[in-house]
Image (spheres, helix red, strand yellow):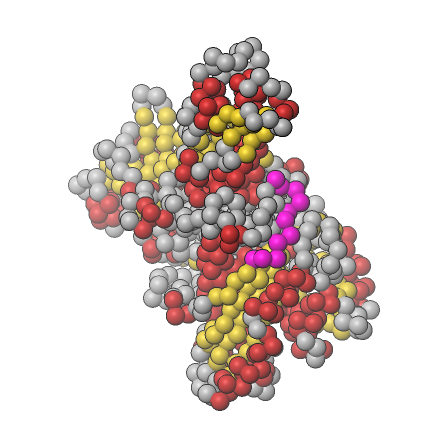
Amino acid sequence: MPKDIDAKESGIGAATKRREDIRFLTGTGNYTDDINVNGQAYVHFLRSDVAHGRITSLETAAAAAMPGVLRVFTGADFEGVGGLPCGWQVTDRFGEVMQEPAHPVLAQGKVRHVGDPIAAVVAESAELARDAAEAIALEIEDLPAVIDMKAALQDGAPKVHDDLTSNLCYDWGFVEENKEAVAKAFDAAAHVTTLELVNNRLVANPMEPRVAVGDFNRATGESTLYTTSQNPHVIRLLMGAFVLGIPEHKLRVVAPDVGGGFGSKIFHYAEEAFCTFAAKALNRAVKWTSSRSEAFMSDAHGRDHVTKIELALDADNNFTALRTETYANMGAYLSTFAPSVPTWLHGTLMAGNYKTPLIYVNVKAVFTNTVPVDAYRGAGRPEATFQLERVIDKAARELDVDPIALRRQNFVTEFPYATPVAVEYDTGDYVATMDKLEEIADITGFAARRAESEKSGKLRGLGVNCYIEACGIAPSNLVGQLGARAGLYESATVRVNATGGIVVMTGSHSHGQGHETSFPQVISEMIGIPEDMVEIEHGDTANTPMGMGTYGSRSLAVGGSAMVRATEKIISKAKKIAAHLMEAADADIELKEGKFSVAGTDKSVAWGDVTLAAYVPHNYPLEEIEPGLEETAFYDPANFTYPAGAYACEVEIDPDTGKVTIERFAAADDFGNIVNPMIVDGQVHGGLGQGIGQALLEGCVYDEDGQLLSASFMDYAMPRADDVPFYQVDHSCQTPCTHNPLGVKGCGEAGAIGSPPAVVNAVVDALRSAGKDVTHIDMPLTPARVWAAMQG
C-alpha cells in the first residue's frame, strides 16, 4: 500500500472528497423520518415519570374513544410476545451465567426507569396520538428506587427485578487465574499507586433522533421496518426470531441514511418492535419519531463506571502488576450488547500499550432504576484507557519522574505480543507514535508557552497519554466462546454489469463513515477503473447479504475485507474470460489499470470488453465458464485489529473561575494502511470533540429518586465549536495489520478513547504546577469542580 498519500489522486491513499456529502449538504438525504407510507398512522408512547413503581391502574377507554384514535396498546397486548433479547451472555468468575431479566416491549406490572414505555396510542396524526395519551388514567404505586450502584448491592436494597436474587447481574473476574499472582506482585512492589475514579454517564445525542416505521403487506404476509439502525440485519434477526416470531424471509429491515449513531443505534429497541407489531395488528403502517426529550430517557446511555485501580512498580519503575475493581451500571434492563462492554471490550484492553506481566480485572455489573447502558463510541476501551492512563500519570508524579519517560520505559516493543489479558497484538510501534507526538505537539516548547500563560494570570498544563484499542470485533469462534449470541463476520456481494460498472452490496452500514467514498477507492485500486464506476448499496436486508453492521471500527477492516475477497473472485473469473478472448492460459493473464494483458506480449483486452463477454458469452465455452460476473464473500477475521496512538493536550485555567480552555491538542495515531486520509482526519476530529465533551462538559445526572436531571440540552452540555481547538493530527506512523488483506486497523473511535485522559492529565498538571495538591478530578471537569479542587 502506498504511504505517499499526498501524491495520490484516486484509489487507496487518495484524499477523495466524500461523494455522499453532496446529498447531505443539499438537503436531499433520505432519512427514516423522510419515509412516509401511504395511509400511515402515528404512535405516541406514554412513558413512566417515576423510576420504580407498580402499575395499579391503567384505564385506556377514554383515550381509545377520542377522535382519530385507532387503538391503545398496553403490556397486556404483548403477553406471549417475546421480550427484547440480550445479544451477549457473560459467565461470572464463579462459572455462573449472568442474571438476565425479561425486557418487555411495554411495561408489564412494573416500571423500572423514568421513560419506561407503559402504553402506546396509535392515531391518525402524531398530535392526536399525543393528546389521547394524556387522557390515559394511570396510577403507579411508587417503590423505592435504587440509583447508586454500590447501594444497589447492599443487603435490603430495593430490587429492580423481583424475580432476580439481587441487583447484581454478574461478578466477572479476568484473568481469574492471575488473581493470586497479582496479589503477590503487589506485596513485593517497591511502589503502588492507587486511584479511585468515575467514568461519567453519557447520552449519545446523535443529530438524528431515532425513528421507526412499521408496515405490513396483508397480501404477502411480509412485514417491513424502516429504522435508524447501524445494523439492519441484526435487528431483523433479533426482532424476527426472538421478539415477534416473524420468519426472516417475511421480515425486511431498511436503514436508509442515518444521521449519526455513536453506538446508540446498534441496539434493538422496544419502539421498533412495537411499530412492526402494531402495523400488522392494524393492517396499516405505523410511524414513531422520537423527540429529543424522549431520546434522553429511551436511547441507551454510555459509560457509567466507578473504578478503583492499582498499579505496582518495581524499584526501577517497571510495571509489575495491575488490578482493578469496577462497578458497571447496566441500568434497568440489559440492552443488546451491554454485558460485553465492561467485560470483554474493557478487561481485555487493560494492558494498554505496556508490557505489564500480571493483570487482574474485576467487574460487578449492577441493575439500577436508570436507562439501560450500552456501547458508546469506543465501548469499553475508553473506560480502560482512562483508568490506565490516569493511574500512570499519578504514579509518575508520586515517583517524580517524567510521565512520557515512564510510559516509554514500559512500552511493548516486540511484536506479536501476547498480553496477560488474552489478546495478542499483531503489530505496532508505540515508540514511533510517541516520537511523532512530541514533534507535532512541540513538547519542547511547552515551558515557554506556560510562562506566557502565567504572565496573563492563567495556569497552563500539559497532559499526555497513550491508547490502544481492539477493533473489528471478531473472530466469530472466539467471541462465541466468550458469550456472543451472533457471528461477527461481514459480507459483500460484488455485481459487475455488462458495461463494466460495479455495484457492491455490503452488510456494513454507513452513518457517517464515508463508505460510499472509501469502498470504491479500494475496488478502483484493485481493478484500475475510475471510482465513479463503483456504487455502494447498504442498509436493506432485502438486497444485501447477511451482515453484522457497523460498530467497533470494523467497517473497512471486516466489511472492506469481505468486499476485497468478493472482488478477488470477480477478477479471477474475469481473467479466465480474458484468457479465452486472447487464446492464452489463465495463469498468464495480468490486470493493470483496467486492462487485461498476456504477460510478455502486447495482447490486451479492456475491462469493459471482458465484462460484456461475461454477459454475451460468444467467445468462450459455457461448459467451462458460466455467464455472469457476480460474487459474494463472507469475511471472518483471525484477530482483532489494534490501532494505537499518543495524544497531547494543553489547557489554560482561569484561577478565579476554574474555567478550562483547551489551547492545543495533538494526536499521533497508527491506523495501519490509510484508504482515505481526509475521511480519517474527519473521524479523528469528531472523536476528539466527543472525548473533550466528556472530559469537560457532558454528564448524565439522576437524583436519588431516579429523576433524570440532565434531560435536555438546557441541562446536558454538548461541546460547541468554541469548546474545541484546532487539532494537529498525524497518522503517518503506519504498521499495517498483518491479518486482513487491506492492512487496515480502524479509526472511528480512537479520538474518543484517547482524549479524555489527556484533558484530565493536563488539568491536573496545571493545578499541580500552581502548587495545588490535586491528584484527580472526576469528569466532567466543570468550572465548579476545578475551582473547588483549587480551594482544596
Residue plotted at (44% across, 48% down): 16
For the residue pair 349 and 414, the one nearer the viewer reads as 414
For the residue pair 662 and 333, the one nearer the viewer reads as 662
Residue plotted at (47% across, 51% down): 15
Query: Relative to 285, does residue 459 appear above or below in the rendering?
Result: below
Residue 263 position, x and y percent, is: 48, 50
Image quarter (top left, top right, bottom left or bottom right) of the C terminus? bottom right
Query: Relative to 80, does residue 479 appear above or below in the rendering?
Result: below
Question: Would residue 645 be found to the left or right of residue 173 on screen?
Answer: left
Residue 547 visible, this orientation = no
For the residue pair 106 and 37, the one nearer the viewer reads as 37
Q: Is residue 736 magenta?
A: yes
Residue 446 visible, this orientation = yes
Which secondary structure class fits the magenta region best?
loop
Q: Report the span colored magenta.
A: 731-741
Q: Is residue 357 magenta?
A: no
- Furthest residue in direction front, as rendered: 602
Residue 343 position, x and y percent, is: 62, 52
For the residue pair 651 and 253, the one nearer the viewer reads as 651
Question: Would residue 127 be found to the left or right of residue 587 on screen?
Answer: left
How many numbered markers are drawn?
A: 0
Residue 701 position, x and y percent, is: 44, 65
